[in-house]
Image: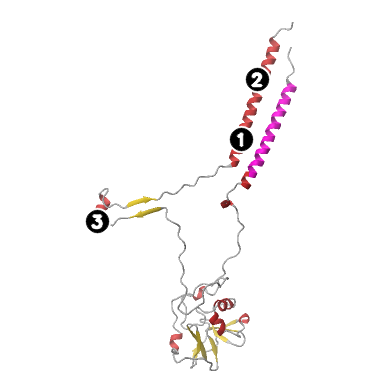
Amino acid sequence: MLKNTQPYRRREFHTFWKYFVCLATIAGVGSVFSFVTLRSPDETIEAPSFTRNVTPAGLRTAVGRVYPYSVIPGGVHTPEELPLRLAADPVAAAHYRGFQAENVRFFRASASQLYYVSYRIKDNIYWTKKQLTVPAGELLYTDGKEVCRARCGNRLSVVLRRPFTPLEPVEPVFDEPTAVPPPELTAELTGPTFRPFDFPAVSAPRIPPAVVVVTPTPLTNRVSACCEFGTNMPRHRFSSLPLATPEPSYSLFSFLAVAALGAKLLWDRRRVRAVSSARAASDVQTPRP
């Protein structure tokens, strides 16, 4: 007599899928947890930083136009630049004491005019004994009371001021720019004090160690070195560096584990179905007593 095996197969099918869904859920949760907690620190995604060095816009235009005896080497070219330069230079800040830097306004000289001009020798500020000519069209700036030259930061006055020195340079020297550019300013202003013609040296960037160290030998004959094998050839020494071993992928392991368990469950299901079919066939062939 043929037995009804449909309920058994249905229960078997439902049990199989329950196990499979549970294992897949556990594997998925484990993969996400391992990816989040076991990732290396180098793979951490950092938020973009919006903090950057701020360079005054007008400072780049003054490259190659540094005038001798400048109170502010490189000059001032924007209203925002003057407070930065004074904050970085105590000598210039002392000379600008009483000057309203927050009220700076730039303008062009409408006509040539004579002024007494301040100038700087190292850390000392002097005034000229004679008036110098400021040509028409030169860029100047003022706080409403005092006037300064934008190209060098030297202050101007219509009356004689002190101190002055007998070593005062002649007028043409003030108008001969040098080819030394001023250093760039940043928002932090942690650099050294500005000095005329004595700018801080720029340190070279740190260079990582080379992977291949080549020690060439002097070649006495370039033709023989190229044509003769093993003669005057440079020796190469390769440094042994540890190779980076890739870390195992926990997501791949979880996927393989789920695939293996699923294959085993499918195999067991097919084996049970085969056994059930064999039993049913034997029951049909067995005669009823």
Q: Where does the image place residue 99, in percent across and percent down from the top left?
A: 60, 84
User: CA gap, disc 2 to disc 3?
Assistant: 85 Å
Q: Where does the image place residue 217, in percent across and percent down from the top left?
A: 30, 55
Q: For numbered disc 1, what is the local secondary structure?
A: helix
For label 3, the crowd category at 10 Å Cα-Cα, with few meaning under 14, some 14 to 19 and many 20 or more, is: few
Label 1, on which residue? 257
For label 1, the crowd category at 10 Å Cα-Cα, with few meaning under 14, some 14 to 19 and many 20 or more, is: some
- Residue shown at 25%/54% (left/top)? 223
Q: Is residue 265 above or below residue 281?
A: below
Q: For numbered disc 3, what is the local secondary structure?
A: loop
Q: Which mark is residue 207?
A: none
Could you tell which of marks 2 and 1 lies nearer the N-terminus? 1
- Residue shown at 69%/10% (left/top)? 285
Q: Amino acid at mark 3?
A: Asn
Query: Relative to the observer, which residue lies in front, 144 or 242?
Result: 242
| Magenta stretch: includes residue 191 | no
Could you tell which of marks 1 and 3 lies nearer the N-terminus? 3
Label 2, on which residue? 274
Q: Quadrant of the N terminus?
A: top right
Q: Which mark is residue 221?
A: 3
Q: Where does the image place residue 188, in percent across and percent down from the top left?
A: 57, 70
The magenta segment: 6-33
Q: Is residue 266 above or below residue 164?
A: above
